[in-house]
Amino acid sequence: ANINIPKNVTGIGISAFSGCTALRSVKLPDKLTVLDSNVFSGCTNLTDIILPAELTTMNTGCLKSCAITEIIIPATVTNIGNNAFSNCGSLASVYV
């Protein structure tokens, strides 16, 4: 499953998509500034996520146990919480 979150969404709650194992791809809206705690934790088939250019914060465990292989972190990010990428065994490249 793929999701495109509508462009007017500015926030996504804690653990909103946690454990969604069918989720494979996510495009986040440009106005989103915070990836809340555990928002995609346990999405074990999530291989592709596009972070918005205005993102400032990636909270604790936001991408924990995902299958992403690479991620581009926008220059606007000033805070990455504990375990943001823990158990992401396929993660080979992080671009900051």
Image (spheres, helix red, strand yellow):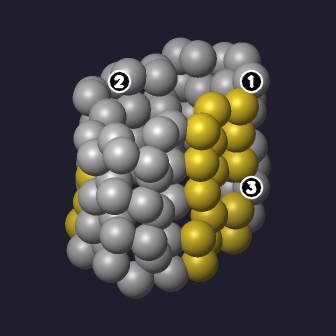
**Cα distance, mark 3 to mark 2?**
21 Å
Q: Quadrant of residue 14?
A: top left
- In this orientation, which residue lies closer to the viewer: 17 or 63? 17
SS at badge 1: loop
Tell whether 80 sits left or right of 49.
Answer: left
- In this orientation, which residue lies closer to the viewer: 66 or 83? 66
Decide: few, some or many residues near mark 3? Use Cα within 10 Å; few <14, some 14-19, many ≥20: some
Reading the image, the residue beneath label 3 is 69
Residue 8 placement (x, y as % from top left): 36, 46
First in sequence: mark 2 vs mark 1: 1
Tell whether 2 sits left or right of 29.
Answer: right
Q: Amino acid at mark 1?
A: Ala
Q: Residue at x 47, y 23 (%)?
A: 17
**For residue 45, above or below residue 49:** above
Tell whether 9 sits left or right of 22.
Answer: left
Residue 47 placement (x, y as % from top left): 74, 43
Please report contact status of discs 2 and 1: CB closer than 8 Å, yes or no.
no
Reading the image, the residue beneath label 1 is 1
**Cα distance, mark 1 to mark 3?**
18 Å
**For residue 78, above or below residue 57:** below
| Res 55 label | none
User: Quick check: can you spot residue 76?
Assistant: yes
Which numbered mark, 2 or 1, is in the foreground of this view? 1
Reading the image, the residue beneath label 2 is 15
Decide: few, some or many residues near mark 1? Use Cα within 10 Å; few <14, some 14-19, many ≥20: few
Give the quadrant of the N terminus.
top right
- In this orientation, which residue lies closer to the viewer: 61 or 32? 32
Q: Amino acid at mark 2?
A: Ser
Residue 54 placement (x, y as % from top left): 35, 70
